[in-house]
Image (tube, helix red, strand yellow):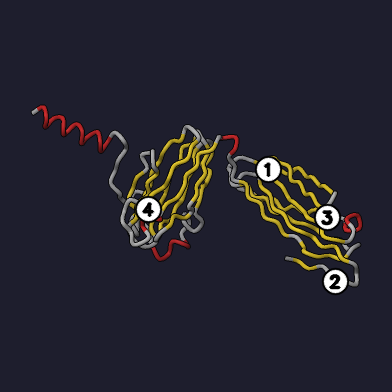
Amino acid sequence: MVLIVGFIATITYGAVGPGIAMIDDDAGSIDPNEISDHERFGETGVEHLGGNEYEVNVVAQAWAYSPSEIEVPAGSEVTFYVTSRDVTHSFTVVGTNVNTMVVPGQISEMTVQFDEPGEYGILCNEYCGEGHHTMEGLLTVVPEDEFDLTELSTDAPREVEVGNETTINATVSNGMQDGLETTATLEIGEQQYERDVTIDGEGSAELTFDVDTDALGEGEHDWTFTVDDHEESGTLSVVSETDGGDTNE
């Protein structure tokens, strides 16, 4: 009787204590052929819900996860939504209680709290074909003050005639629910331009910097555009009127 009670207690704890549950349709179902058009999985990655709560949308397929690298802040509560594009996989975050089968047509939902910075491997524990052993990813928990969901993209000419007006444009997007106050900096040649920018939560800002080609002079001029820890760079050629014209990338 003691052994029987012990076995029952062990099974009960294993099913309830660590938060293990069978896959069901609570998180919804999905047509595997229409994943790219789905409102959640059309664009995979991390979403900020507000406060310290985040969602991560992941698509598994032979033999990779999208995204393959995930970054969240320490002290956050993260809910993973995972589905499969082809066959049955698993989504296992080593060192946590996130370990689920990923079945085509189903959306698996799991929530975990990340209190300390660290790195966690992501593995597939369901045999899914010849490339199964290569299917892996990485979850990185960074200090809260090092985390942001800022994105930067730039649009700049490659060549311009000296004396002509030209601009270097940038789009700064804020993926957080909270507003972003930062400084955008453009360095080109010996010139430097700065602009303070405020972006609403889940908003974006278009920035245009006028470049003085007369002050630059003829030649190749490297430029660097920086916002927080995000940086893009390129080269602007300033030529004489007889050498060419303004050519955009």
Residue closest to the eye, 72 or 139: 139
Residue furthest to the top: 2
Front: mark 3 or 4: 3
Left or right placement of residue 210 versus residue 32 in this view: right
Amino acid type, residue under disc 2 in the picture: Gly
x and y, in percent, of residue 230 in the image: 66, 47
Q: Find residue 204 and report its horizontal and vertical position in percent.
A: 66, 50
Number of marks present in the image shown: 4
Are circles 3 and 4 on residues that touch, CB within 8 Å?
no
- Alpha carbon distance from label 4 to label 2: 56 Å
**SS of the residue under disc 3:** strand
- Spatial distance from mark 3 to mark 4, Cα to Cα? 48 Å
Whole-number angstrom distance, CA of label 1 to CA of label 3: 21 Å
Label 2 or label 1, whichever lies nearer to me, is: 2
Of callouts 4 and 1, the N-terminal one: 4
Q: Is residue 108 left or right of residue 195?
A: left
Residue type indicated by callout 1: Asp
Q: Quadrant of residue 170?
A: bottom right
Tell me where residue 12 appears, x and y as whole percent. Answer: 22, 35
Residue nearest the viewer, comparing 239 with 103: 239
Task: Name the residue tied to disc 3.
Answer: 210
Q: Secondary structure at mark 4?
A: loop
Residue on which the image places disc 2: 244
- Counting residues from the start of the chain, the first of labels 4 and 2 encountered is 4
**Residue at numbered disc 1:** 228
Under circle 2, the secondary element is: loop
Compute the Cα span from label 4 to label 1.
Answer: 35 Å
Position of 128 with respect to 183 (left or right) is: left
SS class of the residue under badge 1? loop
- Residue behind mark 4: 107
